[in-house]
Image: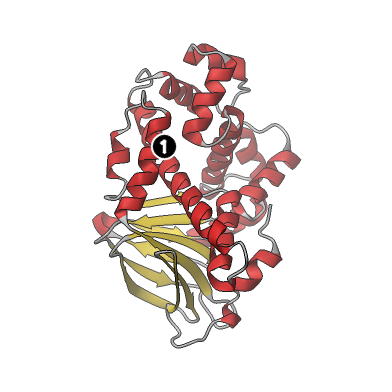
Amino acid sequence: MPIAESLLQPLHASRRTVRQLVENRTLYESHGLDLAIYDTYEEAERVRLDADQVLYCAMLSGKKVLHGEDGYDAAFLPNESFVMSPGDKVYIDFPEASSAAPTTCLTLSFSPTRIIEARDKLAMQHADIQLNSWCNITNHHLHITHSAATQHLLLRIADAFMMGDHDRDLVLNFGVDELLSRMARQYGHQALLQLAAQDPEQNALTAVLSFIDKHLHRAIDVEQLCKVACMSRSKLYQQFTALAGCSPMEYIQQQRLHRAQILLEQGQSVTQAFLSAGFVNAAHFSRRFQQHFGVTPKQYAVKAMQKAG
């Protein structure tokens, strides 16, 4: 669902002192963590950002364009996360920032040790799955679309830093641990998808993911997935949810949404996109798409066309 206005209120740029127009930084420190809010009030190009620790970045409003090493170039939008490793640097463009509509993002700095602890906790839950990429979670940046639940969690953490409510300790201890677990799980999830693309028979879950990817445009039920994995329904749900953070059917919905997103970016109509992605009900598709991406499919298609033009 769209982010509640009550959650956004503490993050409004009007509440922060403006000392500079580009990347105006407001820093909050607590519990050994640094949270920074960056507001930019005018268009700018090639603004450098360096990471001395693991740096989790999340967009709140507006648009950035990231330029990283090895020719990496990508738009950075609300409901997206970008994770940088110690020593990484990126250059940032602000194509839409203005005083009336500032571009705003937040960053959280973590020590590599805390990231590794979160990764190891997750790895212990399913030690039979060998994902070497987990060992490198502090050596690569990630750029992903995150869920509405993660966006709400980020805003709650930021609110706890800034407002100092009575749940501050709980939020900063458990909320940050949850965020780190989401990061580690997402990174492992991406590594598993890469394994599935390379070798669908690597293990039961890669076979399931490969099957889902190849059949997204068709109806998929849990019984089919159980046969592919050679697992009972309960075991499949347990192992799949531990790794992906959601049930198999919810994962299928998320993958269909991302496929529809790509198709819209490629210029397909809303009707073509939702049918090609495997949705059968236009109203359901529109509702889920807006919950996940914060805009309707039609609005997203218009923005994609504007961006391409």
| Direction right: furthest residue | 283
Q: Residue at x 35, y 52 (%)?
A: 114
Q: Residues within 10 Å of mark 1 (few under 14, many from 20)?
A: some
Residue 158, given in percent of the width and then of the height, sits at: 54, 65
Please say if 123 is above or below 169.
above
Whether residue 78 is visible to the viewer of this picture, yes or no, is: no
Q: Label 1 is placed on what type of residue?
A: Leu
Residue projecting furthest to the bottom? 19
Residue 203 position within the rendered picture, expressed as x and y whole percent measured from the top left: 38, 19
User: Mark 1 = which residue?
Assistant: 122
Q: SS at mark 1?
A: helix
User: Image quarter for residue 132?
Assistant: top left
Q: Is residue 11 left or right of residue 106?
A: right
Whole-percent x, y for residue 123 in the image: 38, 34
Residue drawn at 28 percent across, 65 percent down: 52
Residue 46 point in image, percent of width and height: 33, 73
Closer to the camera in the image, 269 or 170? 170
